[in-house]
Image (cartoon, rainbow, N blue to C red):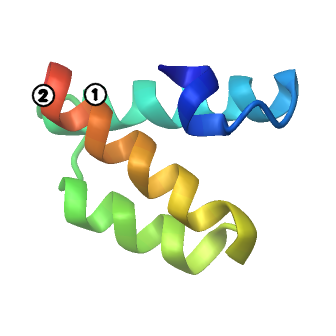
Amino acid sequence: MIKRIAGGVNSVVEHYVLAVMLLAVAVAQGRVPLTVDELKQAVEACVKPQFVAMNLQAIDHAAEAYG
């Protein structure tokens, strides 16, 4: 799933997507004092525009699958 979300860009991007997914799982499970929507807002505000959609997709997949 990570390679599909990352679009086969490179291993650095894949590791970054994995980190975002792990954070999203922790948020969705209530282990981090944020909501999934707040995490998405932070991504939209702080991530380079070309990577926003990929990160939002990673958050959605992780939150739905493991949240």
Give coordinates of residue 40: x percent, y percent: 36, 64
Q: Is residue 44 visible?
A: yes
Q: Can residue 48 be seen in this view?
A: no
Quarter of the figure with residue 32 = top left
Label 1 near label 2: C-beta < 8 Å? yes
Q: Which residue is drawn at 43% across and 41% down?
A: 58
Q: Quadrant of the C terminus?
A: top left
Question: Label 2 sits on what residue type?
Answer: Gly
Disc 1 on helix, strand or loop?
A: helix
How many numbered markers are drawn? 2
Q: Residue 25 carries which label?
A: 1
Left or right: residue 46 compared with residue 10: left
The one of 4 and 39 positioned closer to us in this rendering: 4
Per the model, the C-alpha gap separating discs 2 and 1 is: 6 Å
Q: Which residue is drawn at 63% across and 23% down?
A: 3
Left or right: residue 24 compared with residue 58: left
Q: Residues within 10 Å of mark 1 (few under 14, many from 20)?
A: many
Disc 2 on helix, strand or loop?
A: loop
Give coordinates of residue 5: x percent, y percent: 55, 36
Question: Label 1 sits on what residue type?
Answer: Val
Q: Which residue is drawn at 12% across and 34% down?
A: 30
Residue receiving disc 2: 67
Give coordinates of residue 36: x percent, y percent: 22, 54
Question: Can you say whether 67 is above or below 27 in the image?
Answer: above
Q: Which residue is drawn at 68% across and 38% down?
A: 7
